[in-house]
Amino acid sequence: MSVRAWEQFIKVAQGKENRPAVLHGDTQISFAELMELAEQWARTIAAPAGERVILYSENSISVIGAVLGTWRTGAIPVWTNVDAPLSHLELAVAETEAVCVVSTKPGVAEQLTCRVLAAPLADAGPVQVSGQNEIGSIVYTSGSTGKPKGVVQKAETLIDGARRVAGALGYRSEDRILCPVPFAFDYGWGQLLSLLFQGNTLVLPSPNNAFGICDAITQHKPSVLAGVPAVYSNLMAGLSPIREIDASSIRLITNSGSRIPSRVLESLFETFGAADLSLNYGLTETYRSATLPLPLARTKSHAVGNALPGVDLVIIDKDGKPCPAGETGQIVHRGAGIFEGYWRNPERTAISLRPDPLEPESGRKAVFTGDLGFFDPEGHLVIVGRADRQMKSMGVRVSPDEIEEILLATGHMAEVAITSRPDETIGDLVVAFVVAKPGSDPKEALKALKRDLREKLSPFMTPRVYHYLDALPRNPNRKVDYPALKRMAAEGGPVSQSA
C-alpha cells in the first residue's frame, strides 16, 4: 500500500500544531487550523476515492485547504491555471470528468455543469473516505503544441520529490518560503508541497505582485524567496520599494522556468547581498531535474548544474545515441520524479514517456523533455532551447497554435500567425502577424481584436507586438513560412504596433 498524501501531511503536521502553516497578508493559519480547514473541505467536496476535483483558483489559504480536503477523501486534485482561458478549464473538466471545481473566479459557475465551490460549507455532512488512491495530482500544462494536457504524478513521487529538492537546495525545517508563483505552475506547486510534505511555513504575497512581495518580506520575514524570471524582473524593475526595505531575512533565492536576464541577476545580487541563489531546471513531468551548486551562481548563471539526487540526465542525438560533452542534443530525464503519463492521452504520453535510451530492455521509462542542451566541460547542464515551436513567455510554456486558433475565432482577421522574439524580461515575447479581411480597415480590425482578446487570453499568451501583412508568407508546400516570420519578428517587421 502506497503512502497517501493525506497521511504524509498529518505525519508532518503533528507536533507543529501551533506553528504558522500559511501567512497571507494579515491572515495566518496554524497547522492545527489547516487540518480543520481540510476536514471542512473534505466534508464539502464529498468526492469518492479516485474522482477528480479541479482547482481553478489564485493562491490562497482556502485553496490549500481544498487540496488537503481532496486528498482526505481519496480524490485527486487537478490544477488548472486560473489565468488561462476558460477553454482550458472546460477541457480539464471534460477530460477528467471532474465532480466539482473549486474557484472564486466570477462567471465560472455559469459556464459549467458540474458543481462549483467557492468556500467550504458550514453544514456539510461527515467526511466520507471510500478508499485509497495512489495518484497525488494532475497538473494541466499550458500546452506545448496543441491542447493542454494533464500531467499525472503519484503521491509517492510528489512526497519523494519534495524531500529530494529540500535536501539538494538546503531547505531548513524553520524556513519560511515566500511563493509568488501560482500553484497551478509546477514550481509554485513544488513550494506548496514543501509546506504539506516538509512542514515549511508558506508565505503568500498580498497582492501577488512586486509590491505584495515587498510587504510580505517586511511583515513576515521569509528566509526563502522562490520565483521565476518574470517575478524577479518585475521586482527589480524600479517601481517596487525592494531596495528601500529590510530584506536581510532572505537567505536563499531560487529560480526555475528559464534564465534570469543578466541585468536582473545583477540587481538581485546587489539587493540581496547576503543571499545565495539557486538556479534550477525541471518539467511538470519530472518534478525537478537539475540544480546549480550555490557557489557557482555568480560565475555560471548560464547553466542549471547537476542532476538532483536519484536523477540521471543524458543528452541524446537525433538517432537516440548519447552526445559527448559540449554537443547539443535533446535532454532526457532518467530515474526519480518521472510522471505516470498524460491523463487519458496515450498518444501524447508515448511522445514524452519512452523506453530508457540507455537501457531499452530494462522496461524502465524516461522523459524525453523536448528541451535542447549540452554538458559543459565541468559536467554542468546548459539549456539551449526547445526542439519544437513551443515558447516560454513569463516562465510559462505557450502553444502558438492555440493562440492562433483563439485569434482567428474572433472573426476579425483573415489570417493569423504567431511567433516570438527574445526579450530579457518576458523570455519569449509573443508576436502576432495578422492579415485583415478584404475591404476592412486593418487598424480598426486590430482594435476590435485586442478588445475581444482581453477576456480570452492569459497574460503569458497575449501578443505584445502585432505586425500587419497583406498575406502570410508560405513555403513551396503552401504552408506558413514560420522561419521567415521569425526573422521578420526579430527585424521589426514591415509595419508594427505594440500591444
Image (cartoon, grey):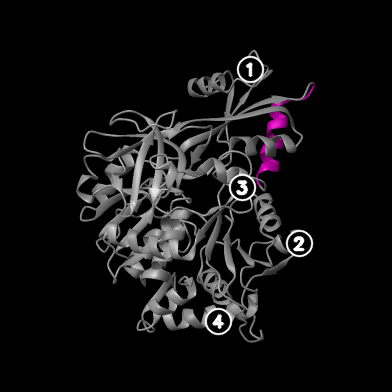
Answer whether labels 3 and 1 touch (C-beta < 8 Å). no
Report how far apart the C-alphas of labels 1 and 2 lie in the structure: 41 Å
Residue located beneath label 3 in the image: 346
Q: Could you tell me what secondary structure mostly forms the magenta stretch?
A: helix
Q: Earlier in the sequence, mark 3 or mark 4?
A: 4
Is 418 on the left or on the right of 449, as rendered? left
Of badges 3 and 1, nearer the viewer stands 3
Looking at the figure, which quarter contains the C terminus?
top right
Residue 166 shows in the view: yes
Q: What element carries label 2?
A: helix
x, y percent for residue 253: 31, 54
Report how far apart the C-alphas of labels 4 and 2 lie in the structure: 27 Å
Q: What residue type is labelled 3?
A: Pro
x, y percent for residue 373: 37, 34
Answer whether labels 3 and 4 touch (C-beta < 8 Å). no
Q: Earlier in the sequence, mark 1 or mark 4?
A: 4
Of badges 2 and 3, nearer the viewer stands 3
Residue located beneath label 4 in the image: 39
Per the rendering, the mark at residue 110 is 2
Q: Callout 3: few (<14), some (14-19), or many (20+) C-alpha neighbours within 10 Å?
A: few
- For the record, the magenta segment spans 439-454
Say which residue appears at 30% left-offset and 30% top-offset.
Answer: 324
Residue located beneath label 1 in the image: 473
Q: What element carries label 4?
A: helix
Report how far apart the C-alphas of labels 3 and 4 lie in the structure: 35 Å
Q: Earlier in the sequence, mark 2 or mark 3?
A: 2
Q: What residue type is labelled 4?
A: Glu
Say which residue appears at 57% left-offset and 23% top-offset.
Answer: 482
